Amino acid sequence: DAGLVDFDEPFTNLLTQGMVLKDGSKMSKSKGNVVSPEEIIAKYGADTARLFILFAAPVDRDLEWSDKGVEGSYRFLNRVWRILGHFEDAIKAGKPDYDVTKLTKDEKELRRILHVTIRKVTEDVRDRFMFNTAVSSIMELVNAFYAFQDKEMNAGLAREVAENLIKLLAPFAPHITEELWSRLFEGQGSVHQQKWPAFDEEATKLAEIEIVLQINGKVRDKLMIPADTDREGMKKIAMELPRTQELTAGKTIVKVICVPKKLVNIVVKG
């Protein structure tokens, strides 16, 4: 802008990271309040240190160092290791081109969460540099995966979840993901050489949603309906409910107000 050079700056924007704090004070050698990376790595491993730093705060904000937070990141990585080990046989037996129409209701919901996570992590990292929320989304996916630890799971789905989970986690925890990848997907090279996951837009859509039933503006019930139900369909479902018939018996229905994907309000008098 000052005209001092005859070329453009080699970047389009500047991202300045926040400071690392401990007990509310900036961490620095002069204050003697530093945490030794060697000690963290020796006790928890480099992946734990990386994951905690990226998860603890947005990259442009100050980060308050927390020993409990470090331990939490360590426990999470152990959860990833355990759940993938639990489903190792199914993951190895699964086929990439499995029939998703044969999934159960719960399995379809897990697959939906997977593809929502792929979209969220991709956008958080690529567009917003929001590494903390990207890690949070991966944690939610792992929680959903854990819900199947005592159930049978479609082998194709187990493979799809495992493959994409490891790829999503790889930039944050490169060492454990490389080990898991070589163990579960032997012969496919390094996880860090794989193509970034792409989400299936159709898979991200909810099959069912919860709406509220109101009588004269007061909540009387909640119900699950197909996500693509239109106003007439909502009205029909709501009017056929035993709860609706009970609460409107002997009364005059003045009108039925339907707000798609949110509520049905039945206005009565008498």
Image (cartoon, rainbow, N blue to C red):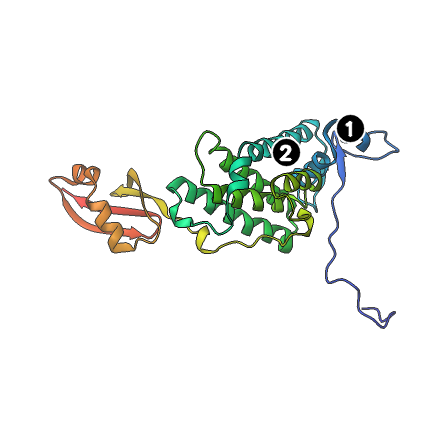
Q: Is residue 248 visible?
A: yes
Residue that label 1 marks: 42
Q: How many marks can you see?
A: 2
- 76 to 260, vertically: above or below: above
Tell me if 224 is positioned left or right of 267 in this view: right
Horizontal and vertical percent position of residue 179: 68, 38
In the rendered image, the quadrant that contains the C terminus is top left
Q: Amino acid at mark 2?
A: Leu
Horizontal and vertical percent position of residue 243: 21, 37
Tell me if 73 is positioned left or right of 206 in this view: right
Q: Nearer the viewer, residue 2 or 196?
A: 196
Q: Earlier in the sequence, mark 1 or mark 2?
A: 1
Tell me if 52 is positioned left or right of 252 in this view: right
Q: Amino acid at mark 1?
A: Ala
User: At numbered mark 2, what does the secondary structure look like: helix, strand or loop?
Assistant: helix
What crowding class fits label 1: few (fewer than 14 Cα within 10 Å), some (14-19), or many (20 or more)? few
Residue that label 2 marks: 77
Tell me if 234 is positioned left or right of 33 in this view: left
Q: Nearer the viewer, residue 57 or 151?
A: 151
- 200 to 79, vertically: above or below: below
In the rendered image, the quadrant that contains the N terminus is bottom right
Q: Nearer the viewer, residue 159 or 242?
A: 159
User: At numbered mark 1, what does the secondary structure look like: helix, strand or loop?
Assistant: helix
Q: Nearer the viewer, residue 75 or 257?
A: 75
Horizontal and vertical percent position of residue 200: 49, 55
Q: Is residue 34 visible?
A: no
